[in-house]
Amino acid sequence: MNLTGKHVAILGVGRSGRAAAALALREGARVSAWDSAGPEAFDGMPEGVEIHPNATETDGRNLISDLLVVSPGIDTYGNYVAAFSGNTKEVIGEVELAARYYGGRIIGITGTNGKTTTTELVERILSHASLGGTACGNYGTPFAEVVLQSNPPAVVSLELSSFQLETITTLHPVVAIWLNFAPDHMDRYPTVEAYRAAKLRIFQNQTSADTAIVRTGEELPELAARVVTFSTTDSSAEWYSEGHTIGHGGTVWLDMDGDTSLRGLHNAENTMAALAACQAFGISPALMREALQGYAPPPHRCELIRTLDGVEYLNDSKATNLHALESALRSQTRPVVLIVGGKEKGLDYAPVIPLLVTKALAVVTFGQIARPLAALFSTAITCESVSTLADAVATARSLAPRGSTVLLSPGTSSFDQFTGYEQRGNAFRDLVHQLR
C-alpha cells in the first residue's frame, strides 16, 4: 500500500488516532486529523498533521480523502462516520492500517470476556521465548506504535475488540483465538447477530495454514483454519482443565494453583487458549511453564489478593455489569462469599439468583443498592447488608469458612462511593491486607 502523496484523514484523535497519523506521515501521506472535541484533544498529535477541532458532519461531507482511518471509539455505522466517508476511497481502522505495514506474525485474540488476561499471557510466553510478543491493539500499545518501532517484534499479541474488527480488510492472524461470546455493546449494535458478525471477522483472512483456537461449544461457522479446542466442561477437548491443572494430550502442562496466581475456570480457559496459541509457534511446555511462573492476572480481574486462614480473597472490581458478575461466579471452584453492590443503575439482578444458590455460601451487599439487593437475594440465600466496603470485607470474613473464597465482584459501577472500579479494587486490596 503506497501512501506517498495521498491524503489520509484520521477521525478521532486519541492515542490510536495519533499513532495512525504518525504511521501515515512516515509512509509519505498528507495527513489531516478530525474530531468533534476542542483543540486541547489534539495535544500530542505529530508535527505536520493538519488539525481540525470541533469537526461537524458538515465538515465531513466537504472532506475529500484517499483513506479515512476511524477510531474504534466512534460508531462505524453512525451518521458522523457516514458524513466523513462519503468522499473517501476506503475506510479502515488503526489496526488495519498498522497490519499493512507490519512484517511479522499476528496472534489475534477476541472474545466478550478474558481478552486482556489472554493477551498478557501470550505476550509473557512469547517474550520468554525471545519472539517479542508485544501486547497491543485494544490492550497495551496501539498496533501502529509497535509498527513504528525501529525494530518491531517478530510476533505480536494483538487484542481485538469488535469495534476494531469492524474496520479490518486484510489483517491476517496466523493464530486467531475465540474465547467466548455473550451479548454486549447493545448500545452500539442493532442486534446480537451484528455484534457476533463483527467479532467473527477475526477469521475472515485465515487459511488452512493457520490456526483457530476455539472454546468447545461456541457454534462457529466452518472455518478455513485448523481448529484447536479447549474446554473446562468437555474432557475430550484438545486442551482441558478442571480449574486447577491444565492438560493436553493426556499430560499436565500447568499447575495453576502451584505455578500461578490465576484462579477460576474462566482463567483456566484464558490460559489454555494462550498455551495453545504459543504451542502453534513450537514453544516447548517447559519454556511455557517457566514463563508463567508467578503470573498474576491484571489488577481488578479476579485478582488473588491473599490467602488468610485457608480463605482466598479475589478482587474482581472490574465486574461493573451483570454479565461480568455471572462470569466470575460461574468460574469459581470453591464455595463463595460474594461481596456485591455499588451504584444503582436500574438493573434486574433476579437472573443471578440461581447461580448464587449453586455457587455461593452467602452474599454481603454494600453501597447505594445494598438494601434492595439484600431484600432480593435473601429470599434464596444468606445475605447481609452493610454500608461500606470496609464493613463488607469484615462481614465477609466472618462468614467465610476455611476452603472458601471471598469474591468482590460488584456487578455494577462504583460511582456511589468511589471514582472508578480501580479505586474500589485498590481499597479492597488494602482492606484485605489489613486483616489479621
Image (spheres, grey):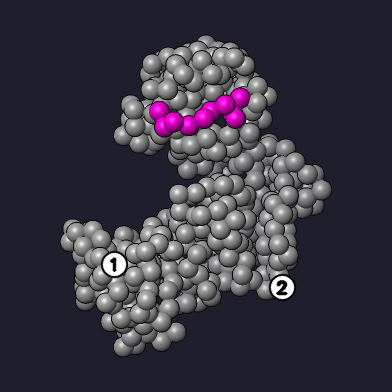
Q: Please state the horizontal and vertical placement of residue 196, each as a whole percent of the image.
A: 59, 56
How packed mark 2 is, by other alpha carbons closer than 10 Å (few <14, some 14-19, many 20 or more), is few
**Residue 229 higher or lower than 168, as above or below:** above
Residue 128 in view of the camera: no
Q: Is residue 356 magenta?
A: no
Q: Check disc 1 and report its element: helix, strand or loop.
A: helix
Horizontal side, residue 379 vs residue 6: left or right: right
**Residue positioned 33% across, 60% down in the render:** 15
* Residue 46 drawn above or below residue 273: below
Q: Nearer the viewer, residue 294 or 1?
A: 1
Q: Which residues are magenta?
A: 344-353
Sequence-wise first label, 1 or 2: 1
The residue most toward the left is: 39
Q: Residue at x 55, y 67 (%)?
A: 106
Q: How many angstroms separate mark 1 from mark 2 (CA)?
A: 43 Å
Task: Tell me which amino acid carries mark 1.
Answer: Glu
Q: What's the residue type where badge 2 is placed?
A: Ser
Residue 351: in magenta span: yes
Which residue in the structure is indicated by mark 2?
208
Q: Is residue 366 visible?
A: yes
Q: Position of residue 286 (x, y in %)?
A: 67, 52
Circle 1 packing at 10 Å, graded few (<14), some (14-19), many (20+), is some
Q: Which residue is mark 1?
A: 57
Q: Secondary structure at mark 2?
A: loop
Secondary structure mainly formed by the magenta segment: loop
Rendered position, 60 above or below 265: below
Tag on residue 217? none
